[in-house]
Image: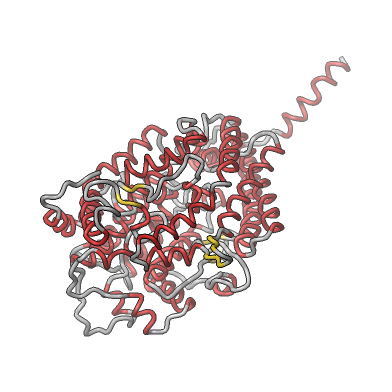
Amino acid sequence: MLKLISLLLPLMIISAHAKTTKEFLKEADETLFRETENEQRAEWVQNNFITDDTTRLTADANARLTEISTRFAKESKKYKGATAEEKRKLYLLLNNLVLPAPKDKKQNEEMTRLQSELESNYGSAKYCVDGKCRELGELEDTLKDSRKPSELLDAWKGWHDNFKTSKQKYQRVVELGNQGARDLGFKDLADVWKSKYDMSTTDYEKNIDRLWTEVKPLYEQLHCYVRGQLNKKYGDSVVSKEGPIPAHLLGNMWAQQWPNIHDLTDVESSHSVDITRLLEDAKYDSKKMVNTGENFYVSLGLQKLPETFYKRSLLDKPRDRDVVCHASAWDIDSKEDVRIKMCIKPNEEDFRTIHHELGHVYYYLAYNKLPFIFNNGANDGFHEGLGDSIQLSLTNQYLKEIKLLKSNDKTAGPDIDYLFKMALEKVAFLPFGLLVDKWRWQVFSGQTKPADYNTSWWKLRRQYQGVMEPVARSADEFDPGAKYHVASFVPYSRYFMAHILQFQFHRALCQAAGQTGPLAECSIYGSKEAGKKLQAMMALGASRPWQDALEAMTGKRDMDATAIRDYFAPLETWLRKKNEGQKCGW
């Protein structure tokens, strides 16, 4: 009898202390809240002070958070959930990881250390010749301003050649991440990344491909016209009339957006506005630019930013150290400590980017009263799309409202040139936004082997973008690693979705604001009704499936490309006429 009791006692103790679903979720929420704040603080310091020590500290914090998040994901599979809220939390715990930790603690530590090293290598990368070094920002300026193919190629190659040594580290992180995914019950990392969208992975891919099919005709017309103009400028020896466009000619290090070559495209304008010149003439500095962005959101009835925002954000590039200048928004403590990190210049690109990054910040503030597990966008495309939708309201009328343009300037509405500039930014991005994760899904699943990383990258860029490598690149190169989001393992299809969603959001907010004219002429600046609709959607966080949030904002439960095609309809008609007689496609 005593022996039986001794055998049963451990089981009785386990049973007595078995957690209920409610207790498990409470523990997960509180623990993840605390550990995420610790990780965010370490990450912030590492991004702003790139040293071996900060890299190590960030790796340790990442390893701990990854290990804890993975543990809760595994445990979540034991519970069913009695209420809709509990079921939603369990779903998010299981499907909200990017790089699940392997079971082996040493492997997890290795994975997070390599992650930090990849990001640090990216942040400190330079192109040096004869002792003179140029950082990414300076190389980007060359691609933006130079019109000499040799200079463009030198800057492009100088940056991309930095990452050959990152390939082996990247390959190892993929191996370890895949192990973590399998330990959690997924096939691989691709399965993990595609499982977080309230639909099957197959349906998610079908939706992404459907959206691309809907917008591809517009992109092909833009590509066709731009290629023709570049051919006129540089000749057949530099860019052909029919093939892909060499990547270094499009004014951007990754050829993902093309507004910097607008001056080469021979599009007449009756009232084009040079926002960079307006900012310079008005002596805008970084703080004034951010103040202007904040005032946009305040005009919608949203709160002013916390006082700590300006004290703790990084707005200017320090002179004394390397920092990761890539613009980003930060939710440090899931309460009031929100920040942005940018190396701001008084130009149009940064002016627009500030309005975008503050969209993230206001989203953070809108859902910070929800349980921590719900502290996220309805899906990651929502977070990006929200800020981008605000950018669509930065019209000439808005510039007049904030006194950057004089009220008597003849700039009442957008012309073809305005739409063309917007297309160089928004439409040109679409295939790149799609292919980055297409490439990674193939890498994660093993469809693309390490020896074929670079070859596969350029194959997809030709297939989707109609863009080619400007000089022969060997299989040993690691050109995908020259993109920040690849080096830091940030999922990218969110940006493709955002470029669809932003136009759906914009149309819905314009309707709420009572504006009935062309979408390209609408600015919701000052509309409290639009602000109410925006705040209501943001306040849902991730507490409901994204289809519910989309319906709350737009009245529809599916993403579709009708709004973006409507926005650019006059331009598409114009492009088709200009491209008559040309062989479009590649």
User: Where's the N terminus, which quadrant?
Assistant: top right
Q: Is residue 501 visible?
A: no
Q: Give the residue drawn at x 81%, y 24%.
A: 9
User: Where's the C terminus, which quadrant?
Assistant: top left
In the rendered image, residue 86, in percent from the top left (x then y), is placed at 53, 41
Taking 330 as reference, is 23 above or below it?
above
Taking 13 as reference, is 348 above or below it?
below
In the depicted view, which residue is nearer to us: 417 or 361?
A: 417
In the depicted view, which residue is nearer to us: 53 or 20?
A: 53
Is residue 446 found left or right of 184 in the rendered image?
left
- Image quarter of residue 538: bottom left
In the rendered image, residue 4, in percent from the top left (x then y), is placed at 83, 16
Q: Give the residue drawn at x 51%, y 67%.
A: 342
In the rendered image, residue 541, in percent from the top left (x then y), is placed at 46, 53
Residue at the right extreme, as displayed: 2
Q: How many marks?
A: 0
Q: Give the residue drawn at x 67%, y 55%.
A: 55
- Image quarter of residue 292: bottom left
Q: Is residue 393 visible?
A: yes
Is residue 206 found left or right of 325 in the rendered image?
left
Taking 406 as reference, is 118 above or below it?
above
Check the image and tell me how it is coloured: secondary structure
In the rendered image, residue 330, in percent from the top left (x then y), is placed at 54, 61
